[in-house]
Amino acid sequence: MTVELRGLRKSFGGVAALDDVSLTIERGEFLALLGPSGSGKTTLLRVLAGLEFLDTGDVVIDGRSMQSVPARERGVGFVFQHYALFRHMTIARNVAFGLEVMPRGRRPSADDIRRRVQSLLELMQIGELGSRYPDQVSGGQRQRVALARALAIEPGLLLLDEPFGALDARVRKSLRIWLRELHDRMKLTSVFVTHDQAEALEMADRIAVMRAGRIEQVAAPDRVYGEPASAFVHEFLGESVRFQCRITDGQAHVVGLPGVAFSTPCPSGPAIALIRPHEIGLRPGVGPARVVSRHTTGALYRIRITLGDLAFEVLSPEAVWTPYEGQTCGLDLSRARAYPIDGQPAKSG
Amino acid sequence: MNQAATREAPATRAALTALAILLLVALLLLPLVVVFTEALQHGLDGVFETFADPDALASIRLTLLVAAVSVPLNAVCGVAAAWCIGRFRFPGRGMLVTLIELPLTVSPVISGLVWVLLFGANGWFGPALSHAGIQVVFAVPGLILATTFVTFPFVARILIPLMEQQGVAEEEAALTLGATGWQTFWHVTLPNIRWGLLYGVLLCNARAMGEFGAVSVVSGHIRGQTMTMPLQIEALFNDYDWVSAFTIAGLLSLLALLTLAVKAVLEWRLGERAGPLL
């Protein structure tokens, strides 16, 4: 289903958790809400589910305003951060819950429910766990139970709050791929909340980066990573090295580095320049940068550089020229991006 | 190492243990033994005689009636109060928690006097009520009111921390799965608090049946009509009817022992479930 968010506002005790959020989620999309804690992403998810009420704005699902539709009538599947499984019910009964509470007219027969629960459990690869209780299975299995329970009601929209937050790194990795495949196979429309940029980059069709109740940028992962709309997005999505710079006539001049400049659509004035460690070029010859150390990390060298009182790391492929420890060299910052100091997103040209 | 703190001489340890056991015997076991030996000093005949007395039977019936009304009432109100306090943040929440504990801190005599002042012949509502033919004080309604007031905190106090700890996530999950409020309460909330609720009801019941002070004030001590078991025991005791007094006391003690046993089982169940939540 298509979900439109129109000017959502919500505040808790005077603090804005959602500050004029507008966004359209397309049918079949896998959207990530990415942001630090307190950025409003979980609030947004709860608003979608009907668990939180808006101050102003509207959620429109398939053309229908959700303003007066309570959570239980939205048909939205919600996977809670800590799964919120019913601890006193077996796993099969957990999954069956959404079917068993249906009004008599719509409720499938007991046999039907049993069959559907079993096939869902098998889809989740936990077909043999139906008679166990939630505290008798592992974290990864609980996650699958939570997902099966949410999918049992055949939701048009699936919401996942930090779905991998409570899992260890190894399980997390394999579940990511599995969940993404499941989404595609079942033709779901999904929104998931995460503070882990790697997770968002790997799984999502689009990423909405949130900060202080606002969406800073919505775009495909490679665009959010490669063309961040603001300094915040740049720094949140990956390692970033920060320089002060001054912009005149579309040229950014890095402060303290005469001759180092790059072109930018950023308006004139003081600004900051951000660049990722692998985008920094090291050039042979006399220059301002001094190499403190150099380690190999497999395919890349990790080179620690000092530049006056700045210290940062550069990632450089083994194939290109790299300086040794103690050497000085030139810097190429032409791939840097400049952002105005007030934090407003740069208008891309 | 924290063993240093417990490295007492064996003799000291033995002495302390002995002292504890001695106190336990002197303060708990001995009175219990006295109750039953006094009750049985004339053999079982004395016991049967006591239970043949219509006033004694009336007091047992009345106690059961008072408990049967006030305990379910407190169970329902306790769950509702705990649900409000455990689930929501609202102005006056802290005040409400304090108010719920009030009956525990106020002397039972005052808990009884309040009702006399409100509903007695010279109380605020007394004349209006007696005009309508309703008698509260020195009658069964007064006993129920006083008992309900005194025993109100037991269920709520046990459920509040339990519900706060369990959080709202499971209820929210039920809502997103299409459950109505009632279905959510019945299938999710209630099963999660059932052991705590039972435990609270048990304590509430023990206190309801054993309450003396508040009940004594509102009772009026009309034999066969407004005497609960504890009041009947006192009356019989004052009449030097030792056997009957201790027989009824024995019955109450048996109830206490039973409560203790069930409580132990419930605590074990509660402890078992008190592990990490999911």
Image (cartoon, helix red, strand yellow):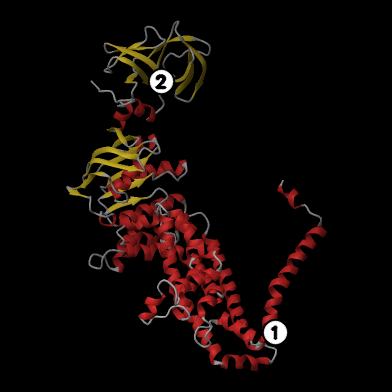
Q: Are marks 1 and 2 in contact (CB under 8 Å)?
A: no
Corner quadrant of residue B229: bottom right
The type of residue carrying mark 1 is Thr
How packed mark 2 is, by other alpha carbons closer than 10 Å (few <14, some 14-19, many 20 or more), is: some
Give the letter of the chain under mark 2.
A
Q: Secondary structure at mark 1?
A: helix
Question: How far across and how far down the image is residue B110, in percent?
Answer: 53, 69
Question: In the image, what residue occupies the spot 39% across and 35% down?
Answer: A198
Q: Secondary structure at mark 2?
A: strand
Q: Nearer the viewer, residue B4 or A130?
A: B4
Asked if one can make out residue B37 in the rendered structure from this viewpoint, the answer is yes
Vertical comparison of A277 with B38: above or below: above
Give the letter of the chain under mark 1.
B
Q: Is residue A130 left or right of residue A21?
A: right
Q: Residue furthest front?
A: B122
The type of residue carrying mark 2 is Arg
Question: In the image, what residue occupies the spot 31% across and 38% down?
Answer: A204
CA gap between label 1 and label 2 equals 88 Å
How packed mark 1 is, by other alpha carbons closer than 10 Å (few <14, some 14-19, many 20 or more), is: some
Vertical comparison of B145 with A161: above or below: below
Question: How far across and how far down the image is residue A284, in percent?
Answer: 43, 8
Please name the residue that numbered disc 2 is placed on: A242
Vertical comparison of A316 with A80: above or below: above
Q: Nearer the viewer, residue A52 or A231?
A: A52
Question: How far across and how far down the image is residue B262, in percent?
Answer: 56, 72
Mark linked to residue B37: 1
Question: How far across and how far down the image is residue A8, in percent?
Answer: 26, 41
